[in-house]
Image (cartoon, coloured by chain):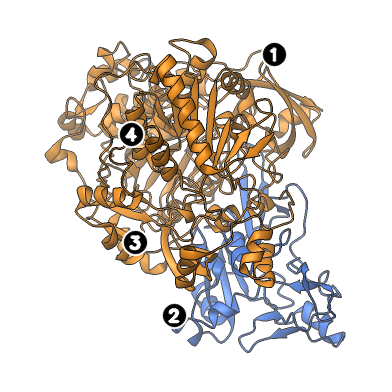
Chain colours: A orange, B blue
Amino acid sequence: MTDTKVGRRDFLRLSSLVGGVAGLQMMGLRPIGGADLQAAQALQDQWVATCCNMCGGTTGVLAHVVNGQVVKIEPNSENPIGVANIYNDFINLKDTGARMCPKGNASIMSLYDPDRVKKPLKRVGARGAGQWQEIPYDQAVQEIADRLAAIKSSSGPEKLVWFTEDNNFIKIQESFCNAFGTPNFLQHANLCDVARKVAFQNTLGVGRPLPDLRNTRYMLIFGWNPMGAMKWAHLPRIINDGLANGAKLVVVDPRCSETAARGRDYGGEWVPIRPGTDGALALAMANVIIAEGLYDSSFVSNYTVGFNELKDLVASKSPEWAAGITGVGAGTIRTLAREVATTKPAVIDVWSGPGHHMNGTEGGRAVAMLAGLLGQVDLPGTLIIPEGTGPKFTTTPPPASMPARVDGRGTKYPFAHGSGVYVEARDAMISGQPYRPKAAVFVMQNFVFSVPNTAKNLQALNNLELIVSVDTHLSETALMSDYVIPGSVYLERTELLGQWVTFPVVTLRQQVVPPLFGQKREYEFIQDLALKLGYAVYPFTVSYEQYLDDALLAGIGLPLASLRALPGATWIGGETHYRKYVAGGFATPSKKFEFYSAQMLAKGLNPLPDYVPTEDRPNGTYPFYLINWKEALHTHSRTMNNRWLMEFHGENELWINSKRAESLGIADGAQVIVENQYASAKAKARVTERIHPEVVGMTHGFGHWGLGPVARGKGTNDSQFVPGKAERISGMAAHKDGAVRVRKA
Amino acid sequence: MADSIQATVTKAAIYVDLKRCIGCDSCSLACKQEFNVALGERWSEIYGAEKEDYPQVRVQVLPMRCQQCNNAPCKTVCDNLKYFAIKRRPDGIVYVDPALCVGCQKCIPVCPYKSMSFNTQKTNKLGKLGVAEKCNFCMQRLDKGLLPACVVTCLGVTLEYGDFNALRAKYPEAQQMGSSVGPRVLYGHMGDEPEHRTAGYPDAVPCHD
């Protein structure tokens, strides 16, 4: 089962040579029989429309199934994700086909990965020792239910903390937490982009405006790499189209990302910046724009609040002031400010580069100010306020009074995103403040690798009495668990998804093949666990498809069967609309674009996005900033056992600027030691011109000791070096704060 | 659209707009899927290189696969050995017939683009493991009216399949690599070609004859 040479080719050959059933058994898979066999035969050769989940981007795909096996994944041009995010662009481009990223193209190798967890596992050795006993599913559910019930009755329901990926089967999990009585339901967004969400929410009233990159003339992007870490498969295409139409692309980033590099080929610029100083740069640009009268006075006077306060704030934020902080020349700052102010329409956007620092919300707000000053909001070619819609799920109601949350959402972190604060929940497991959790459930979550500061994560988990993981692989978190329930790959399950485009779209992710090992899907496990605990209420008592059907009817008035029958299993609810704020205002307390946020002031925060230095910066001992990033070939820490993806990028490298490498005597490809007060580890140096001299960094998610034989020991875990704090406004994990030294190994 | 793909193509070719390529390898993974390319082998890959110093650095990427040469060195060497396992279709696509391949590997080193693979998991004409393999522009898809797998997946919308002369006329600036053998891949916006694979960095691999 750990033969790294076994791939899909072997899987298919074994299946056909030895006969389907025997072949499956050789692979450790469940024989097909009964109803499943009939289902498989009915699916002799067909294409099934579904949505990818190799990452959270939910790109529309078509799965080719032959004799019950998935043999190919191709793009689904009826689904806008992969085509374009503006309605007219989608309609005009769909005949030229949707697009799909390398991870989606490697889906089959995740589905048929021989290293998947196939049976429920119970820990028999010491925690983390990796000794397991396979147990029947019913026994696993019973034992987990018994232990949860015991913890609830002895210590209170809030001692259970539930962690999950966030675009899958959320509402059934929320229902479980409500029925159990724990307020501690957390989703992964606070490890992702909630600084951006909270920044925009508190400025223009919506957490995720989407950039119209295809119809713009200027793209000013702070810390986002949509041509490398493309969450949505249409992003590279719409940017390329925008560039081909003459737009200029300027990327502010410590690293010359794929996006920055592509912009340069079209006369754009890479602006290397010190990590965590983007807010200072944006404020200085606002200074120039206001001082030189370049702002959109009509938009500012009609649709914004706080201009005078912003003007006072930035009066002292000269380009010279920002140059000292950011390392970007004052002349460059002036030029960029004048350019973006006079080249419209412009997309001004900020994502998780600046967002993963302890000043992420302030930095994001400062960038958002520029869009407001220039009126570049909700017009073609600017940041669009999406008109999303989706299913409306009914959840099991929570008890009349819930205990306080363990993670400070809404209290210690006044504007924390609904997904909670992973870092704070982790710290509570160590400190016991405000109380010590006793049990954790992880659904599709490799907590140990995903939360910054790996040692603290392990320490926290060691303090728990009960850990349950639902995962496709024995991740580092699953390895720390008492029970591991086999998870599903997206091709094995059915879900409803509202799509992240500017117009209303609901699509179906649907089962393409039955679960390979006969395992229950995540949502079915949760239903079974709820029933075993005696919660014989909706939605645990209905089939999951019934639950989806109810939610879809409630949300858009469409039965599930009708959505399934639509071309590409995709429902389009309307077009992209612009300048919606003229009639309806912005969804902020003032109904205006808020340079000044009274609700932030009311919570004791600065109502203006003043510059606050980030934390844990380099010093004499640890002279380099350490950053990390995502890339096209991998998702988070979960694709590193995919044999095809690992063939194309099998280990991460520590990027270091050539001048600094030379002075340290580090050659390209050499082994180096990366170290700070939290960890010391080897890495392979990549000597490059593409990174700021004060910065080193690597792709996130490598350096596994779990997951599988392909992943193990490849590359370096970046998170082990990160202090592991949460940003105090949004609760966002500060993944990109931290400093290290580097020396020859 | 399906029927028209091959109807107008007398000389199969792919145009690559290097200004749109982001080097993501989606094409390479689509190829792995389409042909179930053996683990460790790739019929398509991306070369990459850095040019100029910080901060004026430029990044160059180059999708590389079989160029379907008019005068294909792989076919010549195979024909000279009388195996005739490498064939040419009327539309110019050069392909390996696995039933005739003896696994001698003489075609591997002669490819000017290092685009010939050797599948050690497949049985050859002599009943032994080892068959030469390479990109054939997805000719089985073309015959069904489908575009090549790499073309339909490409995130940057970088690749265009069509008739060589039509593409030549459409993109008069396009260049060919290794013109002495007459390849069928046209590269737009070509500069100094990269000398490194992005994935295998910094393993230098010449990709130009």
Dot 1 amino acid type:
Thr
Q: Which residue is mark 3?
A: A569
Please name the residue shown 49% across and 15% down the image: A428
For this view, does A617 lie left or right of residue A521? Answer: right
For this view, does A676 lie left or right of residue A170? Answer: right
- Labels 3 and 4: the sequence-earlier one: 4
The residues bearing labels 1 and 2 have C-alpha atoms spaced at a distance of 63 Å
Please name the residue shown 46% across and 47% down the image: A521
The residues bearing labels 3 and 1 have C-alpha atoms spaced at a distance of 56 Å
Dot 4 amino acid type:
Tyr
Q: Which residue is mark 1?
A: A621
Label 3 CA crowd tier, 10 Å (few <14, some 14–19, many 20+): many
Dot 2 amino acid type:
Ala
The residues bearing labels 3 and 4 have C-alpha atoms spaced at a distance of 33 Å
- Labels 3 and 1: the sequence-earlier one: 3
Confirm or deny contact between disc 3 and disc 2 (CB under 8 A).
no
Q: Which residue is mark 4?
A: A535
On whether disc 4 and disc 1 are found on a single subunit, the reply is yes
Against A733, residue B83 (above or below) is below
Residue A598 visible at all: yes
Query: Which of the labelled discs sits on residue B2, or is there none?
Result: 2
Q: Estimate the x, y position of residue A699 in percent, counting from the top left.
A: 61, 38
Which of discs 4 and 1 lies nearer the camera? The answer is 4
Label 1 CA crowd tier, 10 Å (few <14, some 14–19, many 20+): few
Rendered image quadrant of residue B100: bottom right
Query: Which of the labelled discs sits on residue A686, or is there none?
Result: none
Label 2 CA crowd tier, 10 Å (few <14, some 14–19, many 20+): few
Secondary structure of the residue carrying tag 1 is loop
